[in-house]
Amino acid sequence: MIVNLNLQNKKIIIIGGGNEAQKRINSLLKQECDITIIADSINSQITKLTKTKKIKVIKQKVVDTKFISKLKPNMIITTTNDRKINQKIINAAKKKGITVYSSDNPEDSDFSNPAIIDFENMIQIAIFTGGQSPAMSKKIKEKSEKALKKTITKEDIAQIKIQKMARKLAKEVIDTPDQRRECLRSIMRDNEIDQLIKDGQMKKAEKKVSTILRNWK
Ligand SMILES: C[C@@]1(CC(=O)O)c2cc3[nH]c(cc4nc(cc5[nH]c(cc(n2)[C@H]1CCC(=O)O)[C@@](C)(CC(=O)O)[C@@H]5CCC(=O)O)C(CC(=O)O)=C4CCC(=O)O)c(CCC(=O)O)c3CC(=O)O
Ligand SMILES: NC(=O)C1=CN([C@@H]2O[C@H](COP(=O)(O)OP(=O)(O)OC[C@H]3O[C@@H](n4cnc5c(N)ncnc54)[C@H](O)[C@@H]3O)[C@@H](O)[C@H]2O)C=CC1
């Protein structure tokens, strides 16, 4: 089952500082969460990231699981190339009811990472083979990316921004979910708004949306 994790303000610990850690940090940085890396060595890309982004680093080898009670994380991601320590961390986290992921152990992890196609941080499309073939997920991602870039337009992304603003206002000014849905659909179909979006006139589009919503009966 693919779901999205809401990690806003969550405390996340990543053990290890190699390629896998780097992939996980890059996805975590899309949300406002508190990231701490514990590793005895950190690759150059992660070092660069720690200089520009808010990431804490504890430079040490993890030999036991005491860091869990000390740092009290909401989630632990272990990415070391040491199976034994990864397993120890998984077991300790599970005992404490902490969400855990290990790069070398999909069976014991609480979630999986699909291949992601991202459009301007506004739309994410996930490709997942249920752990059967990560390499095929990557290949299908690369194949579909080209096709999707032709299907998902700049205007679609602008319409998401319009819809975000519209549904916030709709919740304030329209009483029932059915009516809100109908109104949001009519905004999506509105030729005038469509044209304003195409012309890059976002402020005018928003104004028109606001008028439609406030006069909705
Ligand atoms: C189960 C899963 C972990 C999870 O649940 O999160 C998992 C597990 C493992 N992958 C391993 C190897 C490789 N992983 C990749 C690549 C990716 N792996 C990703 C996801 C997942 N990998 C999850 C299932 C996803 C699904 O089923 O769709 C992607 C899609 C997303 C991401 O990592 O963010 C990302 C591409 C992202 C992109 O480019 O966008 C490549 C290819 C390459 O690097 O070129 C290889 C080498 C070739 C191969 O093995 O296929 C090994 C070590 C095996 C060993 O020791 O040999 C394990 C551990 C194990 O199998 O035990
Ligand atoms: N889920 C996936 O898609 C993939 C999973 N893997 C698995 O992930 C593991 C890690 O892969 P990479 O990041 O490429 O390896 P890597 O060798 O680049 O990084 C390992 C990191 O762990 C650190 N480390 C090792 N023992 C430690 C300890 N006790 N305490 C703190 N830090 C420690 C090292 O200093 C290094 O920074 C692999 O062994 C493999 O099993 C590998 C490729 C893809």
Image (spheres, rainbow, N blue to C red):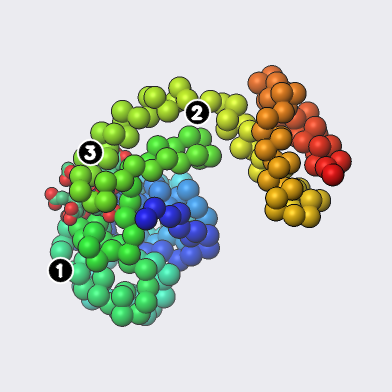
- Residue drawn at (70%, 50%) of the image: 178
Horizontal side of 213 relative to 20 (left or right) equals: right
Residue drawn at 45 percent across, 58 percent down: 5
SS under mark 3: helix
Ligand 2 under 8 Å from disc 1 Cβ = no
User: Which quadrant holds the C terminus?
Assistant: top right
Where on the picture, by quarter, is residue 84?
bottom left
Label 3 near ligand 1 (CB < 8 Å): yes
Going from the N terminus, do you reach mark 2 or mark 3 first? 3
Tell me whether the residue at label 2 lies in contact with that at label 3, contact meaning CB atoms closer than 8 angstroms: no
Label whose residue precedes the other's in the sequence (1 or 2): 1
What is the three-letter code of the residue carrying label 3? Met
For the residues labelled 1 and 2, say whether their Cβ atoms are less than 8 Å apart. no
Amino acid on which disc 1 is placed: Lys
In three-dimensional space, the C-alpha distance between marks 2 and 3, rounded to whole angstroms, equals 23 Å
Is residue 62 or residue 30 the one in the foreground? 30
**Place of residue 4 in the rendered image (x, y in percent of width and height, measured from the top left):** 45, 54
| Nearer to us: label 1 or label 2 | 2
Residue located beneath label 1 in the image: 84
Disc 2: CA contacts within 10 A as few (<14), some (14-19) or many (>=20): few
Q: Is residue 80 visible?
A: no
Residue behind mark 2: 152
| Disc 3 to disc 1, C-alpha distance | 28 Å
Pointer 3 local density, CA inside 10 Å: few below 14, some 14–19, many at least 20: some
**Residue identified by numbered label 3:** 136
